[in-house]
Amino acid sequence: MNLAYLWVAIGGALGSVSRFWLSGIISRHFGETFPFGTLTINFTGSFLIGAFAALAIPEGRMDSQSRAFATQFLMIGVCGGYTTFSSFSLQTLNLLRDREWLYAGGNVILSVVLCMIAVWLGWLLGSTFNTLKGS
């Protein structure tokens, strides 16, 4: 078996468990009327994948082996298992089916806007690390 599949699988398992844990905490704290857990997961996942993507660009400080690991384990595995776009879609559909127009629209707008901001901020953070002088 190609080692890449193992890294993706381990990362996906860690990301999924992290999503389940954090989303549960948020749902218990804020309730489930609005999908704050999914919104938080998508926002933080977007931030992380932005940071990892910036760090993994060929012009960055990672060598090719580290770049491959970051892409397979962190971006595809952890972030892929952690982010919840399919959950977001189903929850939005359920809000629409329940005629909760304001919540459905708010979920779509907040998810898109906040996640775009998060991925940009993550990219900026990762890019900053690329510009630091090596020690």
Image: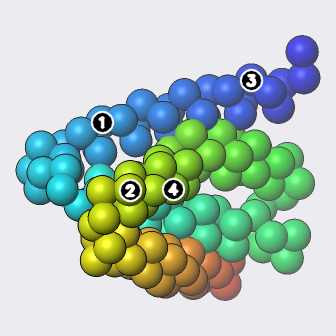
Give the structural element (helix, strand or loop) at label 1.
helix
> Could you tell me if residue 44 is visible in this image?
no
> Could you tell me if residue 52 is visible in this image?
yes
- Residues packed near mark 2 inside 10 Å, few (<14), some (14 to 19) or many (20 plus): few
CA distance for labels 4 and 1? 20 Å
Residue ID at (55%, 49%)? 86
Residue at numbered disc 4: 89
Instruction: Tell me which amino acid carries mark 1.
Output: Trp
Give the left or right position of residue 116, taking residue 39 as reference: right
- State whether residue 45 is above or below residue 15: below
- Sequence-first disc among 4 and 2: 4
Give the structural element (helix, strand or loop) at label 3.
helix
Residue ID at (45%, 56%)? 93
36 or 79: which is nearer to us?
A: 36
Residue at numbered disc 2: 97
Q: Quadrant of residue 30?
A: bottom left
Pair 2/1: label in front: 2
Residue at numbered disc 3: 6
Can you name the residue that lies furthest to the top here? 1
Instruction: Tell me which amino acid carries mark 3.
Output: Leu
